[in-house]
Amino acid sequence: MTPSDAEIEELVRRLGRALLARNLRVAAAESCTGGWIAKALTDVAGSSLWFEGGIVAYSNAAKSSLLGVPAGLIAAYGAVSEPVVRAMAEGARARLGVAFAVAVSGIAGPDGGTPDKPVGTVWLAWTNGRQATAAREQFAGDREAVRRLSVALALRRLIELAEAR
């Protein structure tokens, strides 16, 4: 089920409490979500205490120039891939100097899909500088649903990481 604005806001509030309690900050590197994670985080008053910033790197050139993703990595695996999203997350974490970062790259549709990467394919990665995890999802629904589901998953995993620390 696609999360509502209220559900996303509750996820953000929970993340904020976890980060604040541990004196940690987070950053986001976004492609298909187009800044929606950063918007969701900054919709909550007081987020400046735990949110450092976000980088929207929609094009491949922006992924390389803004996040340091090697162009060869993109050429070899495509922008919507585990190696690229991991590099995006680490690039955001390192450039913004935070404890945690999340990255998202996907095909929200309605076009752009391929047999190997159909519309709704989204790669997400999370890093704390010591370890990184990544997940490939195949979301159903229209463009907004794919993006909204991506934002919610990004937040849920950040909460898990922050609460475990």
Image: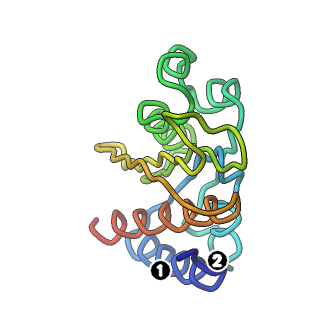
Between discs 2 and 1, the one toward the N terminus: 1
Q: Secondary structure at mark 2?
A: loop
Q: Give the CA distance from mark 2 to mark 1.
A: 13 Å
Question: What percent of the width, then of the height, locates residue 15?
Answer: 47, 73
Q: Are the residues tagged 2 and 1 within 8 Å (C-beta)?
A: no
Measured along the vertical axis of the image, is residue 12 above or below residue 51?
Answer: below
Outermost residue, front side: 115
User: Which residue was labeled with disc 2?
Assistant: 46
Using the image, tell me which numbered label, if any, was put on residue 14: 1
Left or right: 67, with 164 as reference point: right
Q: Using the image as rendered, state which of residue 85 and residue 128 is in the foreground.
A: 85
Residue, x 33% and y 72% (percent of image)? 163
Amino acid type indicated by mark 2:
Gly
Q: How is the image coloured?
A: rainbow
Using the image, tell me which numbered label, if any, was put on residue 48: none
Q: Using the image as rendered, state which of residue 111 and residue 51 is in the foreground.
A: 111
Question: What percent of the width, then of the height, locates residue 26?
Answer: 51, 57
- Pair 2/1: label in front: 1
Measured along the vertical axis of the image, is residue 121 above or below residue 158?
Answer: above
